[in-house]
Image (tube, helix red, strand yellow):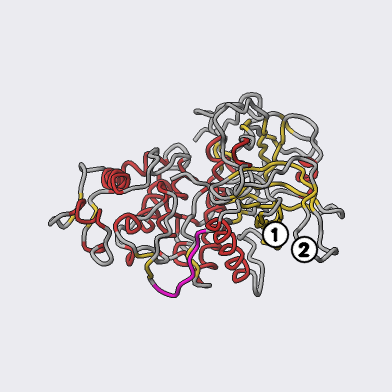
Amino acid sequence: MSEQSGKGTEHVSPMDWDPISTDTADQGPSPLSISDEGYQLYKIESHKPYEISECEYDPGRLPRIILGDVIRPDSQNSNMDKYKVLKYLGRGGFAKVWLSETKIGEYSAIKVTESDKYFREAAEREIMFMGILQKFRQHNNIVKFLGCFAIKNDTVQHMALRFEALGPNLDHILDRSVQKFHPNVMKTIIKQLLEALKYIHRKFIIHVDIKPSNILIAISKENMLDIVHSLGSTDDYYLDLNYSKLNVKLGDFGVSVKTRKACQSEHLSTCAYRAPESFLTTTIDFPIDLWSMGCVIHKIVTRKPLFTCGQEKDDEQHGIAHLIKMARTLGPIPAAPFRTSSRPVYEEVFGKRNSFSRGNPFVRGNFVEAAAGYLEAQEANRFYNFMQKFLEYDPKKRITAAMANEDEFLHPQKRRFIIRRYIIKKRQVNPDTKPEVASQMSAGDNDI
């Protein structure tokens, strides 16, 4: 990699690499400036979430909430806090998320569900899991749950779940940022996610829906205050990329499952991050989270999804199409691991064959090449070896979170960081513009 930073910045010696790579190739916009503290600021502009359409306020759906409203819990307890709505943060399949403030200035993200029974059950399930995860301690890499209450809208009740207010989600950063992170920043993010996954698995919880939009980055209290009181059309998030200060958190447990061993479940992860056994069988077990994590790690390192998924219907043909992508990317899919509790698609994919193949992909070469723009050659090869442990077709052979966190790929490079801040600039756009991922949690977003 080159040792030159973006246009107009100072020369950086090999021992002074910053958390954002200094390579100029395909770098995009250069750093904005050098602050009074000596940190460089980097800017990304991204769209704010879609406004809520009028039809979403139809009976049985969302309560009408506008900026400046005070959300009052539906309770006889007059001492319960009230929450002033400050900003609309984003949406998902069953809820919308709002930034709120109490009368004593405490901020939180409130996830308000639709009133349908299915959505209430998803909210109740998430409340249960957060209670389990926070019973004895608050894990530093899991979004903090602050409580819940009901909101009454005419004669209909909605669930409201309160979480700590955080910064942008990982999908937002990886999709919109063209600056390259120092390898130690990527490794820190990965290690923290694996710590979160190790913790929830020890509590016998399968997350089911691990993906970048369910992973959030903490920001400082000062930055949150700036965002709350910003009167302009943009919100600027500052991320401290010093690996000792960066804090990454896993959230959204609305489709999670609690079990001590493999069980039958129809809960499915988002298509692009879904394990092969979820397409081929009705069994759910802890290794599905490791497959999803592998797909997330691929995107963290390469900035590209391992698999794409643009189909609207999550049906059998959709599953076959995705399995074809797997075989073209990772090589032949063996039939043996998926014979038990198989779905009808199993017979269509394998028939009497022992494997399902499409072409003869050069797997190592493809992974190394994808990482080459972000890692040195030796590191890129370690990345490939690391990925293979997550992307084992046979769930029984897949690596665990605890084992993965000890892998040599995650050993930090011994290079000093001198640049620590990174800025994401959010700007208002025409509501007809295609929406981007929300800045708080996805609230169970409904992409497939």
**Which picture quadrant has residue 436?**
top right
Q: Is residue 246 visible?
A: no
Query: What amino acid type should be assigned to the residue bearing mark 1?
Result: Ala
- Residue 352 place in picture, x, y as percent: 12, 57
Sooner in the amino-acid sequence: mark 2 or mark 1:
2
The Cα atoms of the two marked residues, 2 and 1, are separated by 8 Å
Residue 441 belongs to the span the image colors magenta: no
Q: Residues within 10 Å of mark 2 (few under 14, many from 20)?
A: few
Question: Mark on residue 75?
Answer: 2
In the image, the segment drawn in magenta is 255-261
Vertically, is 63 above or below 140?
Answer: above
Numbered disc 1: secondary structure = strand
Numbered disc 2: secondary structure = loop
- Which residue is at the far front? 155
Q: Residue at x 40, y 48 (%)?
A: 271
Residue placed most toward the observer, 324 or 265: 265
Vertically, is 72 above or below 372?
Answer: below
Q: Residue at x 65, y 52 (%)?
A: 111
- Residue 368 place in picture, x, y as percent: 37, 43
Could you tell me if the residues under marks 2 and 1 are in contact, i.e. CB atoms within 8 Å? yes
How many numbered discs? 2
Residue 259 belongs to the span the image colors magenta: yes
